[in-house]
Image: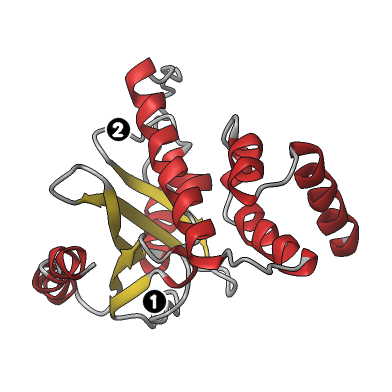
Amino acid sequence: MEENKKVLESFIPIAKSTAKMFGRNCEVVIHDLTNPQASVMFTVNNHVTGRKIGQSFDHLVKTVLLSQDFKEDYLAGYTFVTEDKRTIRSSTSLIRDSKQNVIGAFCINFDVEGLNQMQQFMNTFFSTQVVVQENVEKSEAAIENVEGIVDQLIQQIIQNSVHPVMKRHEKIELIRFMDEKGIFLMKGSVEKVAALLGISKVTVYSYLDEIKNKSN
């Protein structure tokens, strides 16, 4: 929708200023989650992770939404490792429309490899104290929020792909995509996908088994 596009584009100046402030090691990515299969709509300093316009999201469900620390529509300070073994420290904030539907995500990825090397050097001179925090269970409202976001993703992914003469292999590829993105880690997602595709949940599980066997 044109309205959603304008909302997402309004974050572009913030993306540019953030990247400018923190330098070339800071990548900023804006995702259009109304188009999950090709959600990346804008990037700055994309040499940090290699994100390209037209790619899909990677860490949204598995790392962000399912994190115990995800609340108030953002997760800050999580890390992941690139294929060339660099550590990236990231923050993701969701973007909602006027009806409070999630339509996008604003992601900051910072290459901290140089800082890690410096810290390792400093650790030879200073002792560090590790503070262990107990996991705090998510509130019922937070769980419902995450479930609602994943439901929206499921509906949008299927809406973008389903057609009246959809073949079996197309359904399998669609389920493969959702599996790779962590959709099925959410309780009840198999049933929801099955209902929207007009197949049984047993069929979804059989497709997932087939996908798993082919990847082994």
Question: Residue at position x 55%, y 66% from top?
Answer: 161
**Looking at the image, residue 26 lies above or below residue 66:** below
Query: Comparing marks 1 and 2, which lies closer to the viewer?
Result: 2
**Residue matched to label 2:** 71
Q: Nearer the viewer, residue 1 or 31?
A: 1
State the quadrant of the N terminus.
bottom left
- Residue 85 seen by the camera: yes
What crowding class fits label 1: few (fewer than 14 Cα within 10 Å), some (14-19), or many (20 or more)?
Answer: some
Q: Position of residue 86 (x, y in %)?
A: 50, 68
Camera-side residue of 80 and 12: 12
Q: Position of residue 169 (x, y in %)?
A: 78, 68
Residue visible at 64% across and 51% down?
197
Q: Quadrant of the C terminus?
A: bottom right
Task: Identify the amino acid type marked 2.
Answer: Lys
Image-quadrant location for residue 127? top left
Q: Residue at x 43, y 41 (%)?
A: 65
Q: Which residue is mark 1?
A: 48
**50 relative to 166 in the view: left or right:** left
**Does residue 55 sit above or below 148 in this rendering?**
below
